[in-house]
Image (cartoon, helix red, strand yellow):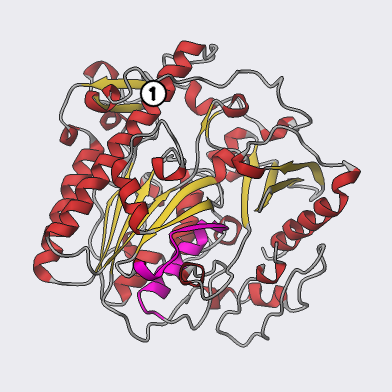
Amino acid sequence: MDHDHLYFRQVSCNCPPMGRQLHGSGRTLAKNRAIIWKCALCLFIPFVAIGKNNKNVLFIAIDDLRPTLGCYGDTIAITPNIDACAKKGVLYKNAYCQQALSGPSRASLLTGMYPDRIGVTDLRTHFREKCPDIITLPQFFKNNGYNAVGIGKIFHASPRTQDTVSWSAPPIYNLSDKKEEYLLLSNQTGRKAIAVEVVDMEENKFIDGKVTKEALGKIKEFGKTGESFFLAVGYIKPHLPFSMPKKYWDLYAGTDFKPLPTGKNNLSGIPEIAFHNSEELRGYTDINNGEINENKAKELLRGYYACASFIDAQIGQLMNELKAVGLDKNTIIVIWGDHGFHLGEQDLWCKSTNFEVACKVPLLIYDPECEKYSRDIDNCVESVDVYPTLLDMCGFKPLSSLPGQSLLPLMTKTGKGKDYAFSQFPRPYNAVHTSNNQTHIGYTVRIKDWRYTLWYDIKSGEITDRELYYLPDGNIEQKNLSGNNLYFNKEAELSAMIKEFRNHF
């Protein structure tokens, strides 16, 4: 890894310029790094517009979607529309969210800030509690003459985490309603019911189908008015419950879903704090605290893949409408999953870990000028990089900087870019609901072939557990190598990266 690219760039203020922060095996950061990050007000004005190139933005956020897509090499997934977009655009093969939970992950991308910087590490906190003057991604475009429209789940879908100032008009279908997550009356209790619901109804009866219908209407409207737009479209599936039209369930008839073996017998040296009890899944009436046997695991796998195909079909409709009204030639498209999802790996279901499966996300960016861009990028990149990238692509020159880096140099092969990603997660599990419950927090860094995690006791600040994994070729964490003298230098290097990262907050 080239550590010359691990740096948090200078903000526009009376701060001294930053030097390079890490080099070799974990040497110290430039002396003035702390001053940069203490200039908080400067961070709230991320960019100043000096002109634009009339490109629109279609930003598509998909809840709980891991890279179960054909374009990522998944041989089971039936996702022709996203795959077609990936062939035309730029596919980031190693993109990572900053926390594998909807609220923090979305707040992080939409503000361009790491979770600790904005104080959002649970599902309850609004980033404006700590950062009232921050400018969000859609808000930036709104402030620069774009019509910023939100349809579906963009910010976390609770009333207290909405951000009306980010939009040109009130968003729609932006709140969660348990009754709307199911179609069958027997399941519409206002609480969790069964985990998999297959219904022979039209797509527009489902909340995601309704989102598509509204988005198609806005695209038609933009085609007529010619106004510049930032259109954010958020889909709920494949979030639990796995409820989808029957035709997508039928797509996988005869598919041999082979669930991973349960139990932790195939894992070695991984501290207990890294795991949870799959609480999110066990809240469903057909799961509870019972064992997830092979038949139930196969049903869940099929339901997840069917929901992914359902959303792929919705995205196909958006792509077709863009082309039909002639907006495909000047619209940047971003397809992003807010975090990954365990499907039995490491005896885990759902998200809420620092493991590879929970942190790795699909990310692809299409620009009408993509002919001159790289097609697949192997570098490790972060969700916080999307904000500066979109501004860069739309011709807005950064005068002050966010911690993320524009990915345009990677796309155009004009720079090496970054090749690392930081993520984090608190414990115990119920800390997802309020940060007041947090006792520990784990910080993890991903570089090529390696993932390293340090767990901190929040009260004492002491490190309680360490995890080091060698992960070539997309492997998952199985053997913790921390403490092995063979990897002393690598562990020291990665430990220094995490410690210096934490020093910024």
> Given the image, on which type of amino acid does mark 1 rest?
Arg
Q: Quadrant of the C terminus?
A: bottom right
Q: Is residue 392 magenta?
A: yes
At horizontal 53% and vertical 36% (from top left) the residue drawn is 351
Q: Position of residue 87 (x, y in %)?
A: 36, 53
Q: Position of residue 57 (x, y in %)?
A: 30, 64
Q: Is residue 133 visible?
A: no
Report the number of discs: 1
Q: Is residue 407 visible?
A: yes
Residue bearing the label numbered 1 = 302
Side of 277 relative to 181 (left or right):
right
**Residue closest to the eye, 157 or 394:** 394
Is 232 located above or below residue 271 in the figure? below
Q: Quadrant of the N terminus?
A: bottom right
Q: Is residue 20 magenta?
A: no
Give the farthest residue toward the left: 224
Is 169 located above or below residue 391 in the figure? above
Side of 379 relative to 194 (left or right):
right
At horizontal 84% and vertical 47% (from top left) the residue drawn is 487
At horizontal 56% and vertical 45% (from top left) the residue drawn is 359
Q: Position of residue 219 (x, y in %)?
A: 16, 58
Give the farthest residue toward the right: 485
Side of 447 relative to 325 (left or right):
right
Is 124 located above or below residue 25 in the figure? above
**Residue closest to the eye, 438 or 336:** 336
Q: Quadrant of residue 90?
A: bottom left
For mark 1, give the secondary structure. Answer: helix
Highlighted range, magenta: 371-396
**Residue closest to the eye, 336 or 31:** 336
**Residue closest to the eye, 81 or 8:** 81
